[in-house]
Amino acid sequence: MAITGLHTLLYSTEVEAFRAVMRDVFEFPHVAFDNGFMIFDCPKATMEPHPGPPDYDVHPGDRVTHEVGFVCDDIEATVEELRAKGVEFRGEPKDEGWGKVIVMVLPGGVEMVVYEPGDG
């Protein structure tokens, strides 16, 4: 068996605005289809099976089944740059010991974590 990548679906009630943020703010390379769908190439990915729930401000609904987040090298600079481009964040980055984390809220209420790995 050869797994060659990870494909994610992020559901949004404001899908056009969400796609615009991925295209125009994050500037992810993408393929656009005639039916309006877009598939974005994202940076490398990791997967961590975790007992959950998250210890920070993600609204999980009835139960936590997954979390999608972006990794960065400098969370303060990243948050500042993205806020200047209109991206909403919940609060300020929080140092959890294992890294710094903040919740980003994208169009349609899609919540993603932005994470700067720590030394722990």
Image (cartoon, grey):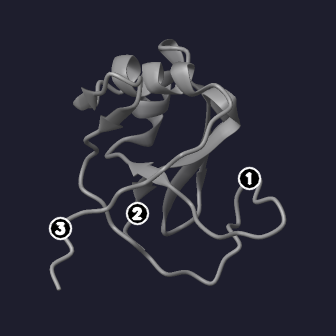
Relative to residue 24, is residue 72 depicted above or below?
below
Relative to residue 63, is residue 26 depicted above or below?
above
- First in residue order: circle 2 vs circle 1: 1
Could you tell me how far apart the alpha carbons at marks 2 and 1 are, in whole angstroms? 19 Å
Residue 95 appears in which quarter of the rendering?
Answer: bottom right
- Can you give x and y, in whole percent of width and height, for residue 76 in the image? 46, 35
Say which residue label 2 marks.
Answer: 118
Neighbourhood count class around disc 3 (C-alpha, 10 Å): few under 14, some 14–19, many 20 upward: few
- First in residue order: circle 3 vs circle 1: 3
- Can you give x and y, in whole percent of width and height, for residue 64 in the image? 70, 69
- Can you give x and y, in whole percent of width and height, for residue 104 in the image? 59, 38
The residue at 58%/66% (across/down) is: 66
| Disc 3, SS | loop
| Disc 2, SS | loop
In the rendered structure, the answer to whether residue 3 lies left or right of residue 13 reads left
Say which residue label 1 marks.
Answer: 57
* Identity, as a three-letter code, of the amino acid under mark 2: Gly
Foreground residue among 37 and 54: 37
The residue at 48%/52% (across/down) is: 69
The residue at 31%/46% (across/down) is: 73
- First in residue order: circle 3 vs circle 2: 3
Foreground residue among 73 and 49: 49
Could you tell me how far apart the alpha carbons at marks 3 and 1 are, in whole angstroms? 32 Å
Quadrant housing the N terminus: bottom left
| Disc 1, SS | loop
Say which residue label 3 marks.
Answer: 4
